[in-house]
Amino acid sequence: MQTWKVLMENGNSCFDSKSWQDAEFCYQHAVEQIKQQWENDPENEELLMAWISVQHNLAAVYEEQGQHYTALRYLTMPHQWMMSLLRGEFVSDSFKALAKQGVKVTLMPLLDFSRRHPICESCFDALQVSPEWLSDLHPTMH
């Protein structure tokens, strides 16, 4: 069985060669493996950032195929998850700090996407973009 890292690399190769279905297949299987490992280690930074990355990769696959609604869904999912972690009562302080960094990583692709494919105002409002996030957008790329 291939690891999620190998699946991500294979997905990236398929994406580069415009093999959209193969890229999607690799990325979806990487998500499954990340989720399985995450169950045993829910505050693992590498798994969190890998999950965000693979969601963004899936969004890129769908955007390249003109499936903008699906692409937007794969961009909003990690952003909304990071926002929920920030508000979570039972989330450790260290994981909240990681979630704050995660928001910065998830926000820029959403804003870029909304420039290419305008989204409705209520959908944009649901992103919960605050001036604080917009003023300090220096995410760590993954």
Image (tube, rainbow, N blue to C red):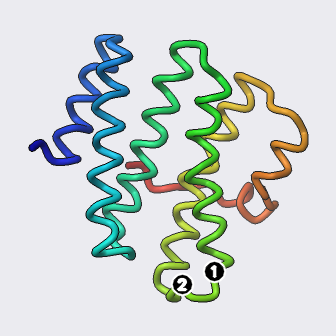
Q: Tag 1, which secondary structure?
A: loop
The residue pinned by badge 2 equals 91
Q: Out of 125 and 25, give the one closest to the viewer.
A: 25
Is 60 drawn above or below residue 78 in the view shown? above
| Residue 33 shown left or right of residue 136 in the figure | left
Query: Which disc is residue 88 wearing?
Result: 1
Q: Amino acid at mark 1?
A: Gly
Residue 8 appears left or right of 142: left
**Mark-to-mark CA distance, 1 and 2:** 5 Å
Which residue is painted at 68% across and 77% down in the image? 87
User: What kind of element bears circle 2?
Assistant: loop
Callout 2, which amino acid?
A: Val
* Residue with the most extreme right position: 121
Question: Which quarter of the figure is the N terminus placed in?
Answer: top left
Tell me the quarter of the picture where residue 103 sits: bottom right
User: Is residue 38 placed above or below 72 in the rendered structure?
Assistant: below
Occupied quadrant, residue 113: top right
In the rendered image, residue 141, in percent from the top left (x then y), is placed at 42, 49
Please give the name of the residue rendered at 35% of the width and 58% of the height, measured from the top-left corner: 35
